[in-house]
Image (spheres, grey):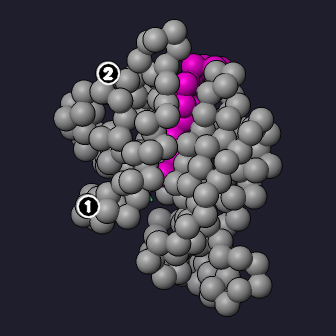
Amino acid sequence: MLANGDDAQHRLYGHRKRALFAEIDGRGGHPPTVVEIGAGTGLNARYLLPGAAWIVVEPNVHFHDHIRAEAEAHGLDLDLRVGTSENLPVADGEADAVVSTLVLCSVGDVRRSLAEARRALRPGGRFMFVEHVAAPAGSSLRRVQRLLRRPWGWVADGCRPDQDTELLIEAAGFSDVWIERFDADLGLVAPHVAGVATR
Ligand SMILES: C[S@@+](CC[C@H](N)C(=O)[O-])C[C@H]1O[C@@H](n2cnc3c(N)ncnc32)[C@H](O)[C@@H]1O
């Protein structure tokens, strides 16, 4: 099902991902090491620099063949690791960048996932994200998000439409956080953020 939505996602988010991920650089002229959490079908591979090391932590094994195919198609050096964002199987400071798109809304423990992303980054390394977020407090959309949270979670694999991901990222201890808000035409989950948090 998720794979069927990839084209729509490229149309919706492609330009933002391309601009964000173009900023990823490696150490001393080497290709970058990019850790991606919850990579799904591997649809972000096309936005990464060919030759990059792509460490993917995706607990759903049904996606793994898709991820392998995307790595091959886009010239990435794939290292598929078993684990979760809460317990990243990545050494301290191993990553030049950690990438998360539409993942933090459904992980079990967001604070811990952000702490793990920060730990995995080298000093100056960057956490890059595109996530849907809660509508502004007090808005009617926020009320609807809260009301529909449980049934939405049942149909959307545990996704929490009213999660204040933006605040959680800002509170995660990064030295610098840049966040752009935007709305996508997606009803209940229209409000989004894209950004970069630097370790
Ligand atoms: C809505 S999908 C997004 C997939 C992809 N990143 C995208 O932009 O389309 C959420 C992904 O997060 C993964 N996921 C859920 N919980 C996770 C966790 N604790 N750690 C890492 N990945 C997780 C799911 O298996 C799924 O691939």
Report the Cα–Cα distance between label 1 and label 2: 24 Å
Q: Is residue 57 visible?
A: no
In the rendered image, the vertical position of residue 162 relative to residue 50, given as above or below: below
Give the extent of the magenta segment.
82-101
Q: Amino acid at mark 1?
A: Asp
Where is residue 145? Give x, y as percent: 62, 81
Q: Is residue 132 above or below residue 127?
A: below
Q: Position of residue 22 (x, y in %)?
A: 43, 36
Dot 2 falls on a residue whose secondary structure is: loop
Is residue 130 one of those drawn in magenta?
A: no
Give x and y (percent) for residue 48. 37, 35
Q: Secondary structure at mark 1?
A: helix
Say which of 5 and 158 sits in front.
5
Identify residue for label 1.
Answer: 7
Q: Residue at x 48, y 82 (%)?
A: 187
26 shown above or below 64: above
The three-letter amino acid code for the residue at tag 2 is: Gly
